[in-house]
Amino acid sequence: MDFTLSEEHEMLRQAVREFTDGAVRPLADQIDAQHAVPRELVDQISELGLMGVAIPEAYGGAGMGETGLCIAMEEITRGDFSVAVTYGAHASIGAMSVLVGGTEEQKQRFLPDFASGAKLACFGLTEAEAGSDAGAMKTTAVRDGDGWVLNGEKVWITGGDIADFAVIYAVTDRAKGAHGGVTAFLVPRDARGYTIGKAEEKMGQRGSSTVTLAFEDVRLGDELRLGEVGQGFRVAMATLDRGRLALGANCLGCAREAQALSVDYANQRQSFGRPIASFQAIQWMLADSAVDLYAMESLVYRTAWLCDAHQPFSRESAMTKLFCSEALDRVVDRAVQIHGGMGYSAEYKIERMYRDARVTRIYEGTNEIQRLVIARDVLKSGA
């Protein structure tokens, strides 16, 4: 078995690392303090060609698959989680909704602009009373002649204030439930009745915008419907399989950074006349984090390979999201402990990383839901 990345993927990693070191890291403190990722930084990511890294070349993308997207997510997150999440809202779950659910005509129409970054997309599934329970959504789309009329509200939408299109999931036949009565739509930002609410104030990942999107009698042509009527839940789950995998890569990048900072600090910090790296207590924490990192990397890139090889990966994606988000919490918690009082100080990056990490166990499907997904598959397959 060969787990070596291709030369193309290695070149991508180096290019994204250089971009992160030169453009993202210097702005990380500002992004957290001002609660905003500068639009020019998003434009720079577009100019690098990263918006379409996972989009096939036939639709204007780089054709580097989910592996390429995971590499980009990992490296950007090492510089700042908020920037990576802003990027992923489009490149992972926004644009990927069209790739997995759109018709050939829709892919040809929308994906080239998504790949170049000329247009951005976001993903709108969650509602105030429909988070883990997607079947409880109240947003509706009603047939009206050759089109649809959309009404409702979506919450916790990352990048909703900068997106040109929102992929919105709405009930089209309540009697059929979530699995047969929900349909996906691609809603343009300039549609009449489309309103963007205020940004949420959050504990961490403060730079990434998280807004409410409201729809009041928004009229949509049928050409903006993604997938078949009633197949929206399938589109959403297929998209989230990719999103959970990409989130695993985010967690891996953040954990790598926390470990690197911890090693540097442990070698420099003196206590009892010698570096704290010489104490077994510190060494064991670093060792435990190294084990977590190895497991995270293995899960992320093996699952990305499954995706790129067009093999089933829903169970593995849930495993990746579950393990990597919980492993990240362990790694950053150890990093705070290694840094001692300075790890609790806002003057050190570790404090921000600790705040940024916590939400990874909640979004892209809570870890409780991931355990249900995995358990159901285990019981179904018998292994």
Image: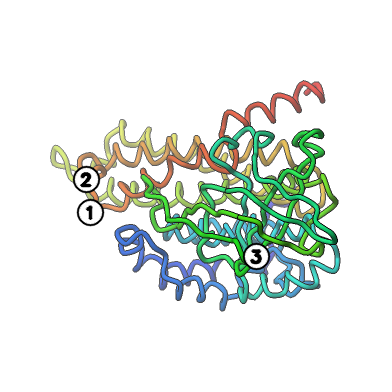
Could you tell me residue 154's position as x and y percent? Answer: 57, 48
Residue 371's disc number:
none
Instruction: Give percent across and percent down for residue 306.
Output: 76, 48
The first of marks 3 and 2 along the sequence is 3
Tell me which numbered mark, 3 or 1, is placed earlier along the sequence. 3
Badge 2 element: helix
Distance between mark 3 and mark 1 Cα atoms: 35 Å
Asked if one can make out residue 11 in the rendered structure from this viewpoint, the answer is no
Q: Position of residue 255 (x, y in %)?
A: 45, 46
Tell me the residue at 79%/37% (across/down): 179
| Left or right relative to 290: residue 264 | left
Instruction: Indicate how the structure is coloured in the image.
Output: rainbow
Query: Nearest the camera: 9 or 246?
Result: 246
Please report contact status of discs 1 and 2: CB closer than 8 Å, yes or no.
yes
For label 1, the SS is loop
Of labels 3 and 1, the one closer to you:
1
Name which residue type carries label 1. Answer: Glu
* Residue at image location 56% in from the left, 32% down from the top: 367
Is 358 on the left or on the right of 48, as rendered?
Answer: left
Residue 335, horizontal then vertical, whole percent? 34, 41
Quadrant housing residue 57: bottom right
What label sits on residue 9 in the rendered view?
Answer: 3
Nearest to viewer (mark 3 / mark 2): 2
Q: Which residue is mark 2?
A: 342
| Viewport quadrant of the C terminus | top right
Instruction: Look at mark 1 in the image and give the residue it sits on.
Output: 347
Task: Answer whether residue 92 is visible to the viewer in this image.
Answer: yes
